[in-house]
Amino acid sequence: MIFSAERFDRSCVFYCILFCVIFMAARTSADQSIPTENARISAGAQVFSKSCLPCHGSNSPAALDLTDPIALRRRATTAAQIVRDGLMPPWLPSESGAPLKHSRTLSAIDRAALLEWLDQNAPGKILAVEVPPLPPQMCVMTVRVAEDWPVGADPGMTLRSFAIAQDPTMNPEGPKFFKAIEFVADAPGVVHGISFLWDELGYAARLDASNPAPGYDAVGDIGLQVSGSGGGVSRLSTIWRLPKGYAMKIPTTAVLVAEVHAEGRGKVESPAGTVCFVGPDFPFKLVHPIAISPSRPATIAAACEAVSISIRAGSRVQSIDIFAKDVKGQLQCVLNIPKWNERLGEPWMFDPPLALNAGTELIVQSTLNADAVKTPLDAHAAAMSQPMIVVLVADKDANLIREK
C-alpha cells in the first residue's frame, strides 16, 4: 500500500499524540503509586526506619549501613537475635530515671513488630532516614581533631587527648557562645566518642608539647575542669545539642581539649574529623558543669535546671546509679544504668530539664563486673573503676543573655 505524504504526516501526528497520552497515563499511574507503595511499608519496617536507621543509614555513625536491602536481609536473623538479647537498640539508661530526650527504647508493640518483620527476612521497602548536618554558616568555631593519630588494627578501646589552641583573631570582641556541637568523622565508626573541656590554665598545651606524638596519652581532665564539662559527641549521637534557651561559653583564651575514644577495626585507620561549635539562639541561660563521682558527691548551692549528663567509665564498671537527695533526705533517681557499656556511652539530655533545689546532693553509686572483682586493682584499674559524671546545669534565677 502506498501512502501519500499528507496521509503519512497525519499518521505521524496521530501516533505521536497516542504515545504522549500513554506516557502521561503511565506517569500519572506511577505518581499515584508512590503513596500506595509507602502505605504498604510494614509496621516493622517503619520501626526499623525510626529506631535503627538514624545510626545505620548511609554515612552511618555506627559504620554499618543497613539501607541496602540485600545487606539487611543477609543480617536479618542476626539482627533479630540482637534485638531479642536487648543489645539493640543500644540504650543504656533504664526508664526509672528522669525522662531523657531522643530515647531509643522500644515499646512492647514496636519491638514485636520489628522482630516479626526481621523474622520474615525484612520483606518489602523501608524508608531511609537521614540526619541532616548543621548548616556550616552557623558555626562560631570549627576545628580539626585527632589529626595524624593512627588507630591500630587490634580491637580494644583506646583514648588520646588533643590540645587545640584557638585562633587569636576568633574572639576579638570577647567570649563567644555555642548551643550545639557536631562531629563529622573522616571514617565513620572509628571514634566511639569525644569529650570536650576548656583549659584556661595551660596544662593541656604543656602535656601536648611534652609528648612527641600528636596529642598526649592521658585522659583529658585538666585541673578542676573535667572531661565532658564542655559537651561531647558519640558515634551514636554525632550532634550534641542543648535545649532551646541554653548555651555554653567559649572562654576567650582557653585551649580546647578533645578526649577522643576510638577502637581498632582490623586495619589501621584515622579517627580524625571536623568539629563545629554552633552559635546559640538569643536569649539564653548559660550552663556550667558539676562533676561528681562515687567518692565525690556534690551539693547544689542554688536552685538550678539540669540539662545534660555525660559519663566516663571503663569496662570494669557494671552498673551506675545517680541520685538527687533533697534536704529532707528523699532520694530521686536521676539516671540508672543497669549494665554499663563503654562502647555505647554518650551524653544524654534531660527532657524536660530536671529541676534541682538548693541543698540537693548529687550522689553516684556504682558496681564492678564479675571479672573486675576477681582482678587485683592497680592504680589505672582503680581510676577506671570510678565513673566520672558531668552534669550541665543552668541556675534557675540566672539572667538571660539577650544580645550578641
Image (spheres, helix red, strand yellow):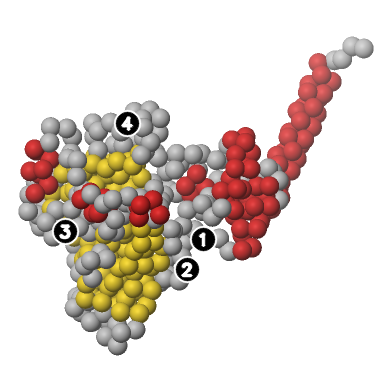
Q: Position of residue 335 (x, y in %)?
A: 38, 68
Real-space CA distance between mark 1 and mark 4, rounded to the nearest whole angstrom: 33 Å
The amino acid sitting under disc 3 is Gln
Real-space CA distance between mark 1 and mark 2, rounded to the nearest whole angstrom: 9 Å
Q: Earlier in the sequence, mark 3 or mark 2?
A: 2
Real-space CA distance between mark 3 and mark 1, rounded to the nearest whole angstrom: 32 Å
Closer to the camera, 298 or 42? Answer: 298
Q: Earlier in the sequence, mark 2 or mark 4?
A: 2
Q: Earlier in the sequence, mark 4 or mark 3?
A: 4
Closer to the camera, 8 or 96? Answer: 96
Q: Earlier in the sequence, mark 3 or mark 1?
A: 1
Residue 105 numbered tag = 1
For label 3, the residue is: 225
Q: Position of residue 266 (x, y in %)?
A: 40, 30
For label 2, the residue is: 95
Q: Earlier in the sequence, mark 1 or mark 2?
A: 2
